[in-house]
Amino acid sequence: TEISLLEDLNQVIENRLENKIAFIRQHGIRVRIHALLVDRYLQTYYEKLGWFSDPHEVFDDIVSDPDKFYIFKSILAKTNVSKFDLPEPEAYRDFFGVNPPSGFKLLSSYCSWSGGCLLETIEKAITDDLPALLSSLAEKREAKAEAAAETKDKPSNRWRRQ
């Protein structure tokens, strides 16, 4: 019974680890979409801002009617973005009500010739690194299961000390 308890405990720990990796991946997807949306809002803002226009009025116009400027449609056109992952436009009205656009930079400003872009790093983690980590856990679990199956082939007397 102690061995089965330890096996059950090991199973719980492995499942928690897999769930945590899946949660981190899902969070990475949300961060990526948020970064893309903020970047799109900023791009639109800089495109529409003229020499004599009121910056506050221009940004209010964009935030109040993002469909007019194709903010969300342009993000949906990107790879690996589902319409179910997109937040409601009202969330960004609230977000930019608290965080002015002057507090953000375009995503392209976070790119360097030696380190690449932050968005590419997030995308690589979502599409490559985290799934590879999950599959390596599955491989380790299979190896443990095979080793356990080999040791269970021998009949043993539970009551005798081994």
Image (cartoon, helix red, strand yellow):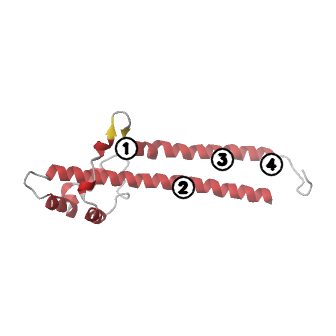
Q: Which residue is mark 2?
A: 20
Q: Which mark is residue 45?
A: none
Q: Secondary structure at mark 3?
A: helix
- Across and down, in percent, residue 127 comes to 45, 44
Depth-wise, is mark 4 or mark 1 nearer the camera?
Answer: 1
Q: Residue furthest top?
A: 114
- Upstream in sequence: badge 3 or badge 4: 3
Q: CA distance from mark 2 to mark 4?
A: 31 Å
Q: Earlier in the sequence, mark 3 or mark 2?
A: 2
Q: Position of residue 154 (x, y in %)?
A: 85, 46
- Residue placed furthest toward the left: 52
The location of residue 101, given as percent across then percent down, is 24, 56
User: Alpha-carbon distance for marks 4 and 1?
Assistant: 49 Å
Q: Nearer the viewer, mark 3 or mark 2?
A: 2
Residue type, mark 2 in image:
Lys
Residue 152: assigned label: 4
Q: Secondary structure at mark 2?
A: helix
Q: Which residue is mark 3?
A: 141
Q: Point out the tag, 1 or 2, that comes first from the N-terminus.
A: 2
* Mark 2 closeness class: few <14, some 14–19, many ≥20 residues within 10 Å: few
Above-or-below relation of 58 to 113: below
Name the front one of labels 1 and 2: 1
Q: CA distance from mark 1 to mark 2?
A: 22 Å
**Badge 4 element:** helix
Q: Measured from the top left, where is residue 85 in percent x and y?
A: 38, 57
